[in-house]
Image (cartoon, rainbow, N blue to C red):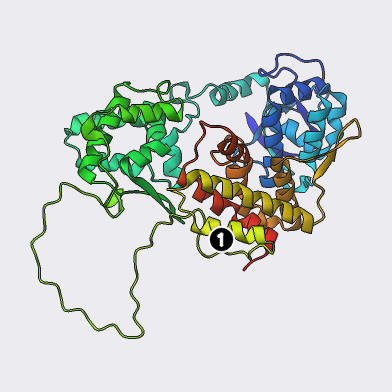
Amino acid sequence: MVEYIELSIDELMLDEDNPRLGSVNNQSAALEAIVKLSESHFRKLMISIKNNGLDPGDSLYVIDSDDGDDYIVLEGNRRLSSLMVLSNPDVIDGTNISETSKKSLLRAAAGFDRSKVEPIRCVKFDRREDANEWIYRRHTGGADGEGRIEWGPLEVQRFSGDRSILDIIDFIGRNAEYSVDEWESTKTVIESRKSSNLTRLLESAAGRKHLGISLLITDAGKIPMLASDPRWALKVLCRIIEDVRDSVVDSRDLNKASDIEKYLQELPENLQPQGDYSEKPRLFKDINLNEKASPVVPAPVPKKVTNKQKTRSVPKARVTLAPKRHSFKPPVSTKGQTLLREASSLDADKFTISSAFVLRGFVELAINDYMDDNGITKFEQKSNGQSIELDLSKKAEKVVQHIVAADSTKNADLRGFRSNILTKTSATSIQSLNGFVHNKFQIPTADALRSAWDCCVPVFVASYGSA
């Protein structure tokens, strides 16, 4: 028997017998143990809850506490720990968390509005044992179909409208000379178990350059295009997909960009690029090599176009890092105007690393200009009294917090900036942009840089005003 109830943060207690932690003696020890599981993950969860609230489709599981006044959270202890620190940062004073981490969590908690998450929807169970059956399903993967099955890369792309690999797979299935059974078997293996290996190959800079693949970025998502001879590209793609299917190459062979380059260079001579690509880029979804030529039909006499009629052309994929026109005013500084001009003229496909440098430079300029204009300090005081300048990541986080605090409606606009620029694991995070400068093996992709620029536009608008 379960009951759906709504509670405040102060009515909830951490589970001191949490399977993640083992048994602990008190609430402070439980909080400390959860934070120390991964301090960076914990801080990101705090920021996510502060900016986006709690997942409306995911309730906390609770039971009555021994005294009957509060409720013990059996499922959702990381979320509750984050809420406890957000709503009352003093709770971390009773833990042995390092001073550096405490200061970081205090900064993350600044500006939290608990009214945006309370009351908290909870599912109340009569006994711990009743909840455990459902908790087990949530934390043991697919559990033969009973639990939650994590999405693979292709499922994520379908959900997000990214057709960059899906359309290529459809192109192979539509045009290659496989039997129906062989293709269905190959496609099943790729999509169910090997999608990450295929994605790693085809989304790499080397893979796209080898095949002549580019992306058309639209409001609906990413659409792949092909600039090489489709019949030759089909042969290369069939070889790649068969090598992935048969485990000729796997994640161990494709661990670094140099591994992917080596694999492509060792393909047979007839699968190597022959000079520059002269084909006009075509959408993969429109290429059908098995279509028979249609009979020639005399072209109809075109009607005269009046002044009220307009012709429409197919949108051309952007090759530059930034578009020619901007929704924000240019910076007042000469350096800022120069960076913006170069961003709008640099061919990101040809000058990828240069584009990465310009992107990072303009992001840093916009962040610093915003902080200067809004009186936000760029320094933090150390325990020894020394004042040091914040790194660019911390500056960017402060700017995002300030923008949202001034206008909460901007929160949704900044999600792309958070996921692409502030998330360390992103291909275009500030850390990755730094890596392109300092790491001799790290090379960005043009499509990722163009997408990152677009995600930064809300920050540029906040810094320089709408055009």
The residue depicted at 56 percent of the width and 64 percent of the height is 326
- State which quarter of the image contains the C terminus: bottom right
Residue 416, visible in the rendered structure: no
Q: Position of residue 333 (x, y in %)?
A: 69, 61
Q: Secondary structure at mark 1?
A: helix
The residue depicted at 72 percent of the width and 58 percent of the height is 407
Crowdedness near tag 1: few (<14), some (14–19) or many (≥20) residues, C-alpha within 10 Å: some
The residue depicted at 49 percent of the width and 58 percent of the height is 345
Q: Position of residue 414 (x, y in %)?
A: 63, 51
Instruction: Specify the quadrant of the image occupied by residue 421.
Output: top right
Instruction: Say left or right for 338 vs 27.
Output: left
Instruction: Say left or right for 80 vs 450.
Output: right
Of all residues, the one furthest to the left in this rendering is: 295
Above or below residue 267? Residue 297 is below
Instruction: Identify which amino acid the numbered label 1 is placed on.
Output: Arg
Nearer to the camera, 143 or 5: 143
Count of number-bearing discs? 1
Instruction: Say left or right for 257 vs 294.
Output: right
Q: Position of residue 194 (x, y in %)?
A: 37, 27
Q: Position of residue 277 (x, y in %)?
A: 29, 48
Nearer to the camera, 409 or 420: 420
To which residue does mark 1 refer?
A: 341
Instruction: Say left or right for 210 vs 25.
Output: left
Above or below residue 158? Residue 255 is above
Instruction: Specify the quadrant of the image occupied by residue 275.
Output: top left
Of all residues, the one furthest to the right in this rendering is: 385
The residue depicted at 70 percent of the width and 28 percent of the height is 77
Nearer to the camera, 120 or 379: 379
Nearer to the camera, 292 or 237: 237
Instruction: Specify the quadrant of the image occupied by residue 1.
Output: top right
